[in-house]
Image (cartoon, helix red, strand yellow):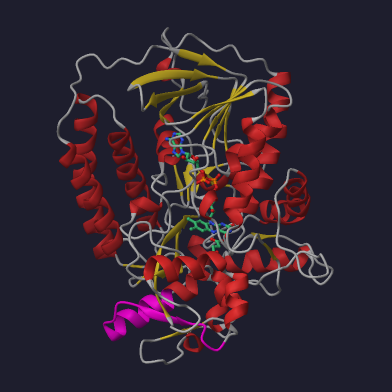
Amino acid sequence: MTHRFDFLVLGSGIAGLSYALKVAECGTVGIITKKERAESNTNYAQGGVAAVMSQLDSFDLHVRDTLSAGVGLCHRDAVEILVREGPERLRELAQIGVEFTRNQAGELDLAREGGHSINRIVHSHDLTGREIERALVARVTSHPNIQVFENHIAIDLLTEHHAATKHVIDRTNIHCWGAYALNVHENAVHAFLANAVLLATGGLGHVYLHTTNPQIATGDGIAMAYRAGATIANMEFVQFHPTSLYDSGSPSFLISEAVRGYGGILKTQDGEEFMQKYDERKSLAPRDIVAYAIDTELKRRGEDFVLLDLRHLPADGIIEHFPHIYETCLNKFKLDITREPIPVVPAAHYACGGVLTDTNGRTSIHGLYASGEVSMTGVHGANRLASNSLLEGLVFSDRAARDARRFFREHPVAIPEIKDWDDSGTLNSEEWVLISHNRREIQQIMWDYVGIVRSNLRLERALRRMDLIRNEVETFYKKTKVTEGLIELRNLALCAMLIIKCAMKRRESRGLHVTTDYRERNDKEFLADTIVD
Ligand code: FAD
Ligand code: SIN
């Protein structure tokens, strides 16, 4: 079956939904999403959205903090846009009904997180993402121009490769006209066609064994874009959040950085503070530094977790500011965070790299935009500043929507006839164990060899193993009817490979990429993005 829209959106987190509402003003919109519509990283965001909303703050300060966290690799033009357009985008969220936490005077309650030199995090208690997602989903669901396809997983982007009549393939001039997607309930693949396509499929946390990301985060968008010929950048910069609750299952439960902003202190198991050895900002240093410090202490001491201690803070304040974290720890994990220190470990959290875009969300493929965690806009450089991610999704989806509307008006697209999905000759596989085993193997390899601290030896070992797994998976994929598990496995294997390859290219330590073979930062040779075409 073929579905046609003016605009197609892949993903229903903050980037996809906020874009959809804006392009729906001038055309029909189809949104494809893997699970039910609210399921996304966005829905689990805790801390909030960083933006200049107080007289005490300034654009210059937010720009400076972002550039400093990014360790030399942020694109200054993109950062300026992020910071200057952010407050207006937040006001728009409030207008569609997002309730942000306010103080007794009715002003926004601005919280603090690592790397910020001032309180600037706008939040809804400690469930900011859920509140934003709720309001966006409500708007999208009632919009007459928007149709949402839940439980549809995009498989691949439609380009010249998929045209029914033969097209000359020129890698410098590729067009995107839509995507094939598997309707998971019907077990049927449909083609979705549109004049402009937005990739908003989020991150790739599940490339790693331990992650804060929900199950949807398997790097599908990056893998699809790479296979279609888009330029990908900076995949080596995977951010590990310093404080996920130790042994809390998959995904790991996050203890928001705002908890440290509120005064929580990191200690070793014998109660010693250690962050002063790594950075003068101590527990409130940027994430790359804190995660590295915890990893180093754990390895040095042979321990499994460090502690986040809140016992010196007033219990009622903790409960008021972090009701979700307090209740989840108490009810699900039998831990009273007002009385007991919290055992925490780093976990894979965020992809700073992704599909390279310009400041209007355009990728290197005509008609294909990318926004949110799937994209590499240049705002995060080698390490994202806390709470700049939701902001990035909002700001660059707005810009992409404006550009796509212009593109749609000015360049009517002639979409060629697209081949139907052809799975003749493939078999239904009973071999689920191959998928689950390969998935686990990828996650273990990436965790052990391509984690917070890397080395040439570990990366070479990871590359050899990943090569083997990828070949196995591709062979299996060609012979087998697609399933959600197989689609994700193929994408996880490819994203893992892209991370390893980018990490091998960067022969220095910078931000989130730390290697024991090149301990220093090397601006002379590596003050540039890592590009894979
Ligand atoms: P997502 O919100 O992840 O949405 C991606 C969408 O794409 C989902 O709907 C998914 O189902 C869909 N999708 C994926 N693959 C496919 C496919 N193949 N086919 C169809 N659909 C697909 N950032 C902050 O700025 N502040 C915070 O406080 C914060 N807290 C966080 C807490 C946690 C626990 C986590 C995990 C992340 C947090 N982040 C935070 C990061 C932030 O939430 C994400 O980076 C951001 O929400 C990404 O938004 P997005 O729209 O790009 O992707
Ligand atoms: C958190 O609440 O610690 C997450 C913030 C972020 O990922 O930016």
Q: Is residue 477 above or below residue 28?
A: below
Q: Please state the horizontal and vertical placement of residue 274, each as a whole percent of the image.
A: 45, 88
Q: Quadrant of the C terminus?
A: top left
Residue 114: % across, % down = 58, 72
- Magenta range is 292-312
Q: Horizontal placement of 121 versus 367: left or right? A: right
Using the image as rendered, state which of residue 104 and residue 476 is in the foreground: 104
Magenta stretch contains residue 468: no
Q: Nearer the viewer, residue 370 or 325?
A: 325
The residue sitting at 30% across, 84% down in the picture is: 300
- Image quarter for residue 45? bottom right
Give coordinates of residue 93: x percent, y percent. 72, 47
Question: Going 36% across and 82% down the picture, which residue do you hit?
Answer: 297
528 relative position to 507: left or right: right
Spot occupied by residue 292 in the image (x, y as percentages of width and height): 42, 74
Residue 248 visible in the shown view: yes
Q: Residue at x 42, y 34 (%)?
A: 224
Question: Does any portion of residue 361 appear in the rendered image?
Answer: no
Q: Looking at the picture, does residue 31 appear above or below residue 205?
A: above
- Answer with the quarter of the image where residue 362 lies: top right
Q: Is residue 62 left or right of residue 219?
A: right
Say if 131 sits above or below 513 in the image: above
